[in-house]
Amino acid sequence: MPAQVDPWRVAGDVARVFDELGLRYSIGGSMASSVSGEPRSTLDVDIVLAIGDGDVAALMQKLGERYYVPAAALRQAVTDRTSANIIEIESSIKVDLFVAGGTPLDDQILARRLCIVVEGDTQALYVHTPEDVLLQKLRWFRRGGEASDRQWRDVLGLIRVQGPRLDRDYLDDGATRLGVRDLFERAVAQSGR
């Protein structure tokens, strides 16, 4: 029987491996957006991962036969500080691994990450802060030609839910560094916050 299609289960599974190997990570994307903003479904897992060349073989061994791991793509992502995908074979859930160092804020994302426990589970997981989710969503919205209604809804949902709890100084600095300050200002105005 196939595994239950649950991205949180898969995130927990790979997080255990990262913890065993001493690799710092933070879950971002729609999963982290759902924690801090308005919930929505997703069938993939986005993770910023601090990994070096010497960690690739151990990671592949620990993921074992449960995951499809394209070794050459993972090694190239580590070298270039880009991304690679791994896929849980039983459920076909895709995990996008973004190698830390690929954006100007990756070190801060890993330093600021939040520890959560998903309802019905006991394992702690690390997720992006609301501010870091917001900045990454703005970055992806810009990179996608500002065409993704889903990304923009996530941005507005985060601002509406978090409101005055958001660290505006951090957001102003991060939005400037990522070249999305105009989008951030438009989102704040549109959200009424």
Image: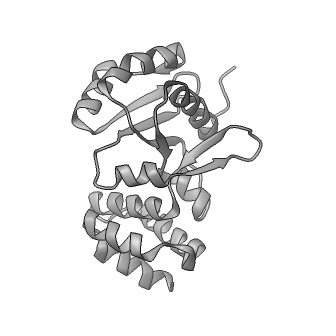
Asked whether 55 or 10 is in front, the reply is: 55
Q: Colour scheme used in the picture? A: one colour
Tell which residue pokes out farthest to the right in this image. Answer: 120
Please indicate whether residue 151 sits to the left or right of residue 32 in the image.
Answer: left
User: Residue 144 lies in what quarter of the image?
Assistant: bottom left
User: Residue 176 lies in what quarter of the image?
Assistant: bottom left
Please indicate whether residue 115 sits to the left or right of residue 129 in the image.
Answer: right
Asked whether 135 or 5 is in front, the reply is: 135
The residue under the point 28% across, 55% down is 104
The residue under the point 39% across, 58% down is 136
Residue 89, image x, y percentages: 53, 22
Tell which residue pokes out farthest to the left in this image. Answer: 80
In the image, residue 93 above or below residue 154: above
Q: How many marks?
A: 0
Residue 15, image x, y percentages: 55, 33
In the image, residue 20 above or below residue 168: above
Q: Quadrant of the N terminus?
A: top right
Asked whether 3 or 107 is in front, the reply is: 107
The residue under the point 44% across, 60% down is 132
Asked whether 43 or 36 is in front, the reply is: 36
